[in-house]
Amino acid sequence: MSTTTPTPAGTLPAPGPADDPKPPPVVVGADGSECGLRAVRWAAEEAVRRGAPLRIVHATPHLGHRGVAGSPAGDLPRARGATAQAYTVARHTAPSVDVSTKLVPGEPVQALLHAAEDAQLVVLGITTTGAADEMVLASVAQKVAARSPRPVVVVPRSRPGGTGSRPHVAVLGLGEREDDEPVAVFAAEEALRADRPLLVLHTRADDDGAWAADSAQWAERWPDLRATHTPVPGPTGGRVLAAACPTPLMAMSAGHGGLLHRPLDGLHRWLLRHCTSPMAFVPPMHRVTGKEPCEEIIAVG
């Protein structure tokens, strides 16, 4: 079940080049909450930056089931209301964005993972209080980020103040060494799209000789990127946040916690609970290539 941006009566959509297919969408999960709507706003702005359509997805297990005497189940009106509200917010945030909505029967995690297969980015909202019950409240974001084949941006609830001219941040060294490459590429491209500088945090102590630790190689690959490099040895969640935040976006590897359907690694879960800036979890190389790592190298959460 889906809706798309309406075309005014009596007009025809402008024809596009036959050989210029529409780019993959930015997918955002909408659940009707204020945190979900904040994610919709962020996703709408990001879709404009990427020149991509925006797809709003709402999933509920009982969608389409019949209630008493064949009446529609109560979930259907709520689902329609949530997607309609998200659609309105997206259009107000970015009037030029191409928006569609989709109601999906089933569990949110599976629906979002399925939507991610044809997307270029997935965006989710989350509350961030640091409370112990965040482990329950963040379960959808954790599971999607741990298993998505595409980068997942988690947008926390709003905090007073802004980021001003603060840079985007790339955190390297939170996965295998080969996982630094997709994080660096994602973070550099995001910073260039947003016209922001990039702060690269190096958390691995033995990176001497690696390209990611060589600022000259960064300058060669992205000559227009304003990048600075800072070591953060022996990383803890607190040290990473102190070095990075506030920031418009902090990118890191999603780690290997998703193997065998595990949740995110321990440090990632801590950051998910405590960080008040948007976080991008970039899938590790094994998830992109389909080659699972050996069990011995999985970080324990």
Image (tube, grey):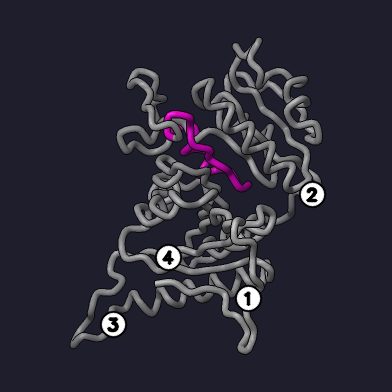
To which residue does mark 2 refer? 164
**Could you tell me which secondary element the residue under label 3 belongs to?**
loop
The quadrant of the image that shows the N terminus is: bottom left
| Residue at the image point whose x is 47% and y is 31% from the top | 255
Characterize the local packing of mark 2: few (<14), some (14-19) or many (20 or more) Cα atoms within 10 angstroms.
few
Foreground label between 2 and 3: 3
Is 231 on the left-hand or right-hand side of 296? Answer: right
Give the magenta-colored segment's residue range. 265-287
- In this view of the protein, can residue 127 be seen by the observer? no
- Give the image quarter of residue 264: top left
Instruction: Kindly identify the residue that appears in the image at 40 percent across and 50 percent down.
Output: 113
Residue 275: say if magenta: yes
Q: Which-is-in-front pick, marks 4 and 2?
A: 4
Q: What is the C-alpha distance between the residues marked 2 and 3? A: 48 Å
Mark carried by residue 58: 4
**Sequence-earlier tag: 4 or 1:** 1
Under mark 1, the amino acid is Pro
Kindly give the residue lying farthest to the front in the view shown: 18
Residue 72 has which mark?
A: 3
Dot 4: within a 10 Å radius of its alpha carbon, few (fewer than 14), some, or many (20 or more) residues?
Answer: many
**Residue topped by disc 1:** 13
